[in-house]
Each structure stands twice: as structure tokens, then as C-alpha cells.
Amino acid sequence: MKTKTLMASAIAAALIACTWTASAQDASQASSDQANAGNAKRLDAITVTGSHIRSVDVETSQPVFTMDRQAIKATGLTNLNDVLASLTSIGTPDITPQDTLSSGMDVGGRYVDIRNLGSNRTLVLVNGHRWSTSLSGLTDLSTIPTSMVERIDILKDGASSVYGSDAIAGVVNIITREKFEGAEANVYYGSNQQGDGQQKNADFTWGHSTSKSSTIISASYQDQSPMWDRTRAITRYGYGPRHPITGLGSGPWGRVIDPRAAGTEGAGAYNDQGKWTPNQYVINHGNADTGDIGNYHIYNSNPADLYNTNQDTTFRAGSKLKTLFAQERYKLTDDITLTGTASYSTRDTSSQLAGYPLSTSGISTANLVIDPSNAYNPFPGYETEFMRRTVELPRITWANSRLAHVDLGAQGYFNFLHHDWSWDANYTFSQTKLRQITTGNLYLPNVLNAIGPTALINGQLACADAAARATGCVPWNVLAGPGYTPSSLWPYLNSVGTARQQSQTDDVSVNTGGGLFDLPGGTVNIAGGLEHRREKGYFQPYGPDSAGETTNLASDPSKGRYYVNEAYLELDVPLLRDLPGAQELGINVASRYSYYSNFGSTTNNKYSLRWRPITDLLLRGTYAKGFRAPALQDLYGGNAQSFESFLDPCDSIYGTAASNAKVAASCAAAGVPEGYRQVSQAGPVNGGGGQTTIPFTQVSNPKLKPETSSTRTLGLVYSPHYVDGLDITLDFYDIRLKQAITYLDASDILNYCYVDNLADYCKNITRSSTGLITSLNEGPVNLGAASTSGFDFGIHYRLPTTSFGQFRIGVDGNYLSKYQTSNGPGSTMKNLAGWMNGTQALYRIRSNTQVDWDYKQFGASWTVRYYSGLKDSCWDVGVECDNPNYPNPVFPGQGMAQKGSATFNDAQLRYKTPWDATLSVGVNNIFNKKGPYYYNVSFSGTGSPPYNPQFDLDRYFYVQYSQKF
């Protein structure tokens, strides 16, 4: 309440002073010269990202990094997410283009993450207006055509008081071209040295301006070929080339579990604890006589009986994007302009996973066993449990995303209180439709028919059930390896499912602002506005998937909506100007009130200070409160299944129980037997854990509250007058996040239960008598916290023009001093700065250095990208390990391996032709640098450990041609 009172008092005082000043002024004193000067100032004033107040000053109290069109082209990158990812303050997004293992409708999109705080905590704007978001709250940057981008502003500061929800880590504001005369065509081709991942782009832009209107139309096409795990050593195996047999999955050769009674001679053995362990057998490779147990051998996790799933998996999905963009500005009168923007895009992506690991234990919705009377059962008379990967039928996902976005508005100017004021009214409509088609999963009713009872009919082996035969059933020799299943049977077994999702935003806003009165430091300005926004969406899964009738992950339908009403005020007070020790001194105060239909109201304030003690030096600082409202998926998402990767703390060798007696006692009290080993598809796991063979359940939480944050920044901008063209910036930031919406995963819940002894979390876990986790419920809660701080620095110098051209040198960097997280009650904050943490590479130092040269029609640039070394988990004691006893905050007990730094070099050459065209050729990662291997990299979100998704895979060549007409 105190901050709200301070804000109200400040604005009230300004309004009272405004009224007094206005009454004391003599309107007749206003001259035509002053009016003309005011009009010129009106034209020069712009709205800077991070504020609603129009200003002629580009440098503000907030740290904003701007990347113009020329700088974007110099990167040689054509996707906005790749361009942004090259910046030092940008981390790895929650979902990367390499993420083909994650399920969900957001996979295939392109996202951005400021400060490694999560993509849904970065607000994406286009021309100051919100862009479309998915049910999960993510904004797909691939739907924004690069050809229309004039510049990108990155506000590295909290901005909820200005823009509302989501602007916790910062704001990406993409500014499109406002005026364009003539036409321009661009073509681009790029390829990795390996010969894959080719990027083919083409776009055409036409524009025309008159004294009253400005029209721009742009069409673009992008085609990116897929990349495959099998083509490179670093991605060919699940844990890289140094450990090729670790992480192998179940094989395509049938494996069975001896179904005979405990104690039967030759059927198994009792372990040291007196537990019966039945034998497992694998069919001899190349043998199709699966009904004879004599054709099998004992399964003992021999790599020869397993399968490298990476050889059938895409590393990066192929994609095609088509976009049409139109923008119109029409000057209705001298003071009123009508604006309109429309964009339509369609994106198609395709990814592939290895065939499904079909197993009795992995299916909970059916009794998936080989029937006792099936001719291919090696144990006639017994229901026989089995495992078999269907490599002949890879799982392929096609996804189509269609975005329609419309902005309609009017803006204008008027004179009030003898000062210029501006106003605007806008309506924004965004709708995203997603359609996902999956094939390669199995339709379980038909599988059960095909491994069910068999009979000889007219001398031919057939399904015994007449109804099943009528639908196309033929017996499936499921235990035989590849090549022994008739091709005519796969369509009968295959499941082709379609899921759909839609999200829609309707936003209406009105804004106004202008000068109130004059102080010695300048004009006191105020801005205010109202906004009403409605969010709604739904997800409709494929019916048989939801019913558990296929091997695809089951999920329930989702549907939800909410609305928000908001009001804001912003006051800018220039206190002093052109005085000794105060060439400029000003404060800015902003406050935004938000009412959400689903959880209530929140008020967020921001206070900023700018001080220029001398002409060359600007000091600036901010303090801001922020929030993020729960996304529709967080609140209303239906239950969904997921195969999770984790390390069970009860594992007797690699789990915490192996070295902690209290944890071991907690596990034993829960019924976990002594000597228990966590098992993945391939068998017992190693120190990195493994993927469950049984899907866990993810749930939503309609009782979620908004996340809250506080942000502090303090910085300087130094532009010495005695060195023309030199600018130096240094900004400190500190962001603290509370009530973070955290999806507690399997590792969190297991550790809270057995390590922290929090009984409430144990309710989410169910185990069998062998200790195997048979079910686990995961979901979002307001229990997380995060804190990060560090420094951004930049040095930019435009050298004097010489006889051999113009040189520009730029250095931008980030130093991360702290990155702490906590996921639950009672857990201590873990400082992860300097560690590889799943999808997050938390470098202590990251920098970009660029030298750019122009001479007449020629140009060139050289960029050096530096990433400091990171700490990683040991592979094992004495194996890729520097200190096995080092406290590991990512995987406790796994020690530390220090990995070295990585530096990548990029080069580009340009030539401007006499016919108004520009030809550019370039090489990214010109020395074909390979980064270190990181075993902490997670499968979900990034794709393939030990590859760091921020690193280049290969040397990359490109050529681009731009023609103006």
C-alpha cells in the first residue's frame, strides 16, 4: 500500500501543479514560432521501448539494447530466434529447434529467453503490441517475418508497470518498417559443412508512400532441411562418442520374461534378499522361429541386444514457413492517422523418433501379453510379457501452425495545457491454430488382436477371432526381429492421430500522454491508458490417444479462458538541466493496476532515475516490481502423460540412499527393497539416471497465483566528447523471482519425499513390490524462487573515416555473478552460476566482439563469440572427472568436471553493385570449432546430450543477394 500511496501522491502533486501553472499562463504569449518549434519537436519525439512517454532523448534510465537492420543482416542468420540467441544476455529457450524428444504442441516453434529465466518470462512485442502466445504462454518468433524488421529493441529490465504480465526478465520489441518506397527482393542459401540443415529463403517487399499514406506489403518463404543425429559423432549416440553403449534403448529383437512360477528350475533365481527374479530371453538375431524357447539366449543388457535410437532420430526438425505481411498508415487529417497491420503465416515442421519400445510394463491401459494360445508364444499356456521396438515403423510428427494477427488503430495529436499531447486507440487480434499429426504409434486393440489367440484355418495360421479377422487381423510374430513382419500388417497396427490446439487474444487499448507544465529541467510529462484483454484457447487430442488405446502419450482435452482489465499511469519529471553537476537530472514513476478474472488484482510500480553530472556521462537506475500471470495451460490443461528422465534417490548404487543412511531408511520405510536398482529400457541406470519405462502424469492447477518479481538496475553510459564515436555502457542487474510457477518433475518430487522427508509429496508416488515406480503425478505449484544478478557491458567505437574506409568496433558482454534457484519448500537456494544446468548454460562470462569495415561499395565484418568454461557432472569417479567430492548443485553426489571455454569466429564479405544490389557471402564458425561435451544437458528441451544447444555444430556457409528496385 505504501508504494501505491507514493505513486498516487506524486501524480496528484503533478496534476495540482499543472492546474496552477496553466491558470497562471497567458495564452496570448504563444507565438507562431513556438508553435512551429512544437510541431518539429512532435515529429522528432518517439516512444522508446520501456516507456509510454514520447521523448526526443534516445538514452533513458532503462538499459535498452538495439539491433538495427544492418546488424541483423551481418549475423548471416535469417530466423529471429537465432539472431537474438547470439546476444550475450539471451539464454537457451525452454524449447529449442533440436528438441524432437519433447511432446507438446509448442515443439517446432522458435522462442527467446532473456537472462535464462524462461521463455514465458520474456514479453515479445511487435511495434509495442503483444504478439500471439500459445496455451503455455510462449511466443513463436518464427511467425514474424525478418524481411519486415527495421530494428529489435531488447529491454533488459522488468517492465510489468508499463506492459503488464510476462515482462519479468525483459522485453523484446520488434519494430517493423514504417515507410518504404519501391521494391526489394532477397534470396538466401546456407548450408552446414556436413551438407545438411540447408536454409533456403526468399522474400519480396513492396512499398509506396504519398503525402497522406504509406503502404508496405511483404511476402516471405523459408525452407530449412532436417538434420539427423546419425550424421555427426557428437549426436550419433545418446551420451556422445566417448560412451557409445550408454543410453541405448530396447532392441527390435523380441525379449520375453519367463512366466513360470517362482522357484521353477531354470526359470530364474532368488537374489540375496530372497526375491525371485525371473529370467529374460532374447530371440537369436535372424531367427523367426519364436515359438521355440531354444532359439533364445539369456538377456543380460548386452549392447548387441539393444538399439541406438539416435540413428533413426532427427536432430533438428525440417520446417517450411510462409508469411504474408501488410502495413498501412493513412493520414486522415494533420493530427489524426489511421494505422493497420495484418500478418498471416503458416509453418510446417516434421520430426522423427525411432520406433516405439513396445513392452508389457510400458502399457498401463491394457493387459499387453502374448496370448497363451498364440502360435508364436515361446511359453505355450502362459500369458507372456514381452518387449520389442518397432524400428520398421518410426514415429513421425507433422505439425502445422497458422497465425493470423491484425492490429487496427488510430493515433493523433492535440494541444492541451499549452503542450503537445498524443493519443492512440488500438485493437489487436491474434489467433494461432495448431494441427499435429502423429504416425508410428501402435493401435493397441489391433495389437492385442494380432498377438492374441491363433488358429489354423484352411491350413493357414490366422487370428482365431472372426471379428478381428474381418477388420484385417493377421497373426503378428512380434518377437521376430526386423524383416519378419509382413508389410501388409503395419497399416493394421499403425495409429495415425490428429490433435488440434487454438489460442486467441483480443486486446483493446487506449493511451494518451503529453506535457503538464515546465520545470527548470524541462517539461513534466504524463502518460496513461486503459487496456482490456481476453485470452482463450483449447486443446483437443486424438480420441484414441486420450482413451489409452494407442502407444502415444495420453492427454485429456483442455479448455480455458480469462480476461484482464488494466490501467496505468506514468510520470516523467525532469528536475534539473544544464547546471554544474546536473546537466540532466530526472525521475520516472510508473504504476499499473491489473485485474484478472481468475485470481484477482495486482499493482506493480517502477521507479527510475537518470542523472548526467557532466555532458559525457549518464548514470541511471531503476527499481521495479513485476508479475507473470499463469498461462492457460498451467490453469486448465488436461492431464497428460510424459516419459521422464530422472535419478531415483532410492537407487542403491547411484542414488542419494547409497551414501545417506537417513534417505536409505526413508526408502525402506516406503517399501523399497534393499539393493533396489532403477531400471530404464536398457537395464540398470548409471549416475546420470535414465528414462522411465512407464509414463508419468502431468496435471494442471487452477489455484495458481501470479509470480512476483523485483528488479534493480544501476548503470552508466559514457560518451567522451574528446573521442568522437565512442560509447561505453555498464549496467548492473539484480532480479528476484518469488512464487515462481514451477512444474515439479520426477526428480523434485522424489527428492522432496525421500531426501527432505516432506510427506505431502510422497502421496504422488506409487511403487511396486520390487521398488519400481508405477505412477507419479507432476504438476505446477507456486513454490519456486530464482535470483540472478550480473553485469552487462558494451564498448562501441566508430573510428574516423580514413582513405581506406570506415571501421567500427563493438564489444558486448555479460558477467553472471549469481544465478540461484529453489523449487520447493524448505529447499535451499542453489547457486548454479558457472554450471551447465539442463537446458541452461550459465556462463560466468559471455562476449561478442565485432570489427566492421566499409569502403566504397565493399564491406566486411569479423565477429568473435566467446563462452567461458562451465562446470559439469563427472561421468564417473576417475572418468572425465576433476573432483568427485565437489558439491554438485545440479546432480548432488556426482562431483564436478570443469569444461573449457569455447570461441567461435564468423566472417562476412559484402559488395554493393552498380545496379543497386548487395551480395553477401559468409562463414559462421570459420575454424569449425567444436565445444566441450556436457553430460548435464537434458534430453528434453535441447535434443541430444552432450551437445550444448548454444554452440555451433559445424562450419556454416551462406550467400545472400538483395536487389532493390
Image (spheres, rainbow, N blue to C red):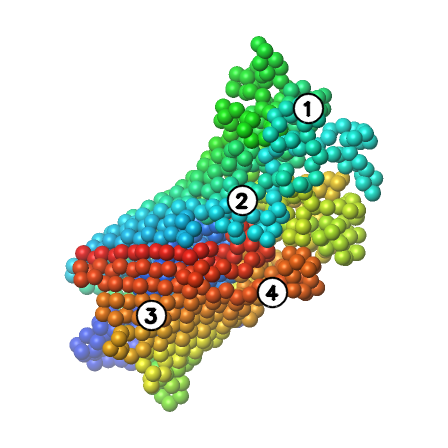
Q: Label 1, on which residue? A: 292
**Could you tell me which quadrant the C terminus lies in?**
bottom left
First-in-chain label (1 vs 4): 1
Inspect the image, locate mark 1, and give the three-letter code of the amino acid beneath it: Asp
List x then y, in percent, for residue 228: 47, 46
- Disc 2 is placed on an element classified as helix
List x then y, in percent, for residue 527: 36, 67
Residue lying furthest top:
458
Q: Residues at badges 1 and 4 in contact (C-beta under 8 Å)? A: no
Q: How far apart are the two marked residues, 1 and 4, measured between alpha carbons?
A: 52 Å
Q: Label 3, on which residue? A: 852
Q: How far apart are the two marked residues, 3 and 2, measured between alpha carbons?
A: 41 Å
Is residue 640 in view from this perspective?
no
Q: How far apart are the two marked residues, 3 and 1, measured between alpha carbons?
A: 73 Å
**Looking at the image, residue 686 lies above or below residue 210:** above
Q: How far apart are the two marked residues, 3 and 4, measured between alpha carbons?
A: 34 Å
Q: Label 4, on which residue? A: 898
**Residue shown at the point (26%, 75%) measured from the top left:** 804
Inspect the image, locate mark 3, and give the three-letter code of the amino acid beneath it: Asp
First-in-chain label (2 vs 4): 2
Q: Residues at badges 2 and 4 in contact (C-beta under 8 Å)? A: no
